[in-house]
Image (cartoon, rainbow, N blue to C red):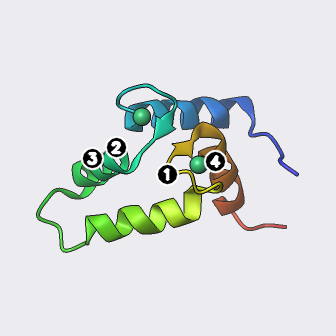
Amino acid sequence: MTIPLNQQETEELRKFFDEIDQDNNGKIDRQELKQLLETIWGKNTDIDITEAVESTFNKCDLNDDGFITFDELASLGKSDSRSGD
Ligand SMILES: [Ca+2]
Ligand SMILES: [Ca+2]
């Protein structure tokens, strides 16, 4: 069962998603996520970006098709935010 995000959350997530989704095809692929992480962390980071991309996809790519859709990101953001159940 999926509880929809409220409007503000949806808008913020949509903005975030659109920033990552460079070619605007509605899906985030590994290359796009990699670019995002390189922007955040820089190329000289000790963090293994390739590994971070893989682990993010393992978590976010729910149907395992190699892309993260807005819905997948939204449902992750939902379960990730504040564990108060
Ligand atoms: Ca894309
Ligand atoms: Ca997917």
- Picture quadrant where residue 23 is located: top left
Q: Is mark 3 within 8 Å of ligand 1?
A: no
Which residue lies at the image location 43% right of the left edge and 25% below the top edge? 24
The dot on residue 32 is: 2
The reply, left or right, for residue 41 in relation to residue 84 is left
Query: What x and y, as percent, mark residue 4?
Result: 79, 40
Q: Which residue is mark 3?
A: 35
Q: Where does the image place residue 78, in percent across and percent down from the top left? A: 70, 53
- Disc 3 marks a residue whose amino acid type is Gln
Circle nearer the N terminus (1, 2): 2
Residue 20, relative to residue 56: is it above or below?
above
SS label for mark 3: helix
- Pinpoint residue 75: horizontal percent, then vertical percent: 69, 50
Is label 2's Cβ within 8 Å of ligand 1? yes
Amino acid type, label 2: Glu
Looking at the rendered structure, the kind of residue marked 1 is Gly
Mark with earlier residue (4, 3): 3
Name the residue carrying label 1: 66
Tell whether label 3 touches label 2 (CB within 8 Å).
yes
- Residue at mark 4 to residue at mark 3: CA–CA distance: 19 Å
Q: Secondary structure at mark 4?
A: helix
Picture mark count: 4
Give the residue number, with chain letter if any, for mark 4.
72
Classify mark 4: residues with Cα within 10 Å, few (<14), some (14-19) or many (20+): some
The quadrant where residue 85 appears:
bottom right
